[in-house]
Image (cartoon, rainbow, N blue to C red):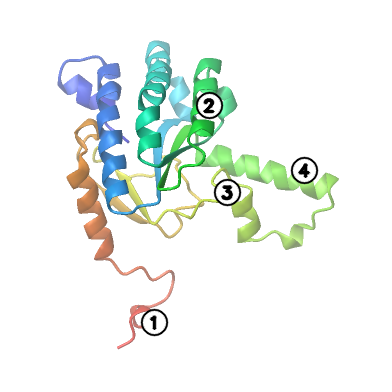
Amino acid sequence: MDGNGRWAEQKGEHRVVGHANGVRSVREALVAATEIGVRYLTLYAFSTENWKRPRPEVEALMDLLVNTVVGELDELNNNGVRLNAIGDIDSLPKSCRDTLEQAILDTAKNDRITITLALSYSARWEIVEMARTLATKARSEGLDPSTINDAMVAEHLATKGMPDPELLIRTSGEQRISNFLLWQIAYAELWFTPVLWPDFRKEHLFRAILDFQSRQRRFGLIGEQITPA
């Protein structure tokens, strides 16, 4: 969800105003995804690198997170939305962590769509944590390193129990992954748009989905193997 700060700066506003306006885009994306039957929507909300931003901006983002989660809780439950979070959640301020964990519990039985917030997250952090866990099991639990495979790695990532993404959307015109779900997006389709996140609406998500549906996903095969003549 890129471009909040630039959106605000273009309007002569503080960067935090862009983040606040980005909340509407989250609602739009969630409603659109729910309408067309998407079961999992993951939003890269705050990276481990974002902690390096100016302190007032980080504090404002944390406050915005708390207020948004609390303000949207009834709406999430009314629409069957289950809230989830991945990342170094322990690094969040206690008020944010407590609010987030309670909201996750309060929506745990919803099953229409799962919205996952990646908070204090980076793929490198996740992969290092996975490696540490498997190394510990090899040393203390007798795990045979030769038995480690793709499935075992996936079971020790933050996204355990979630399907790998089929489509990755990046807003704001930047064309890079920025340390997001590097293992999981091995075969995801990528879609880039110049639209800044606060201007992202349902029609943009639908456009991305239509483009995705026009593509042939080969997973290393050739076209004839996917759609034989």
Residue 53 in view, yes or no: no
Q: Quadrant of the N terminus?
A: top left
Q: Are marks 2 and 4 in contact (CB under 8 Å)?
A: no
Residue 160 is labelled as: 3
Name the quadrant containing residue 43. Answer: top left
Mark 4 or 3, which is nearer the eye? 3
Q: Residue at x 28, y 59 (%)?
A: 212
CA gap between label 3 and label 2 equals: 20 Å
Mark 3 or 2, which is nearer the eye? 2
CA gap between label 2 and label 4 equals: 30 Å
Residue 136 is labelled as: 4
| Residue that badge 2 annotates | 102
Q: Are marks 1 and 2 in contact (CB under 8 Å)?
A: no
Instruction: Give the camera-side residue of 178 and 37.
Output: 37
What residue occupies the far left of the structure in this picture?
A: 11
Residue 192 is labelled as: none
| Residue that badge 1 annotates | 225
Query: What crowding class fits label 1: few (fewer than 14 Cα within 10 Å), some (14-19), or many (20 or more)?
Result: few
What residue occupies the far bottom of the structure in this picture?
A: 229
Instruction: Give the camera-side residue of 205 and 91.
Output: 205
